[in-house]
Image (cartoon, helix red, strand yellow):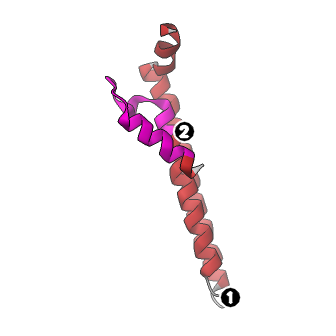
Amino acid sequence: MIIFSVTYIVELYRQDHEYNIWSLPMFWICLGTLLFNLGGFSRDLLGWFSSKDAFANTIRILRGINHGLNYVLYSCIIIAFICQKIFGTYRRESADM
């Protein structure tokens, strides 16, 4: 998912576009997925390298990181829905076909 998200964002950046990428719902979904998966990967590495002695503190920290990542992911999805409603991005693209 990280590779797909980065690929989409790079391709979106390379395109000649006359619209603002911040108004694209797919950009927000891709950004949320990228941040969620990067954070999850980092969280898993942190948990894997933590010592057995500080296991209780590590679990509490990892649980807090997981809650924060969920907030980031779902906030980006909500922003995507709001962008779709405000800018009507998908309606305009489907009307051109």
Which three-letter amino acid code belongs to the residue tagged 2?
A: Ile
Which three-letter amino acid code belongs to the residue tagged 1?
A: Lys
Q: At numbered mark 2, what does the secondary structure look like: helix, strand or loop?
A: helix
Residue 72 x %, y %: 51, 50
Is residue 31 at least partly visible in the picture? no
Q: Is residue 94 left or right of residue 54?
A: left
- Quadrant of the rendered image containing residue 47: bottom right
Q: Which residue is mark 2?
A: 77
CB within 8 Å, label 1 to label 2: no
Q: Nearer the viewer, residue 87 or 60?
A: 87
Is residue 21 at least partly visible in the picture? yes
Q: At numbered mark 1, what does the secondary structure look like: helix, strand or loop?
A: loop
Q: Magenta stretch mostly in which secondary structure?
A: helix
Residue at horizontal 52 percent and vertical 45 percent from the top: 5
Q: Nearer the viewer, residue 58 or 28?
A: 28
Q: Which residues are magenta?
A: 4-28
Residue 90 x %, y %: 51, 19
Q: Nearer the viewer, residue 62 or 39?
A: 39
Tell me the number on the disc at residue 66.
Answer: none
Q: Which residue is mark 1?
A: 52
Q: Is residue 18 left or right of residue 53?
A: left
Does 62 appear in magenta?
no
Residue 11 x %, y %: 43, 37
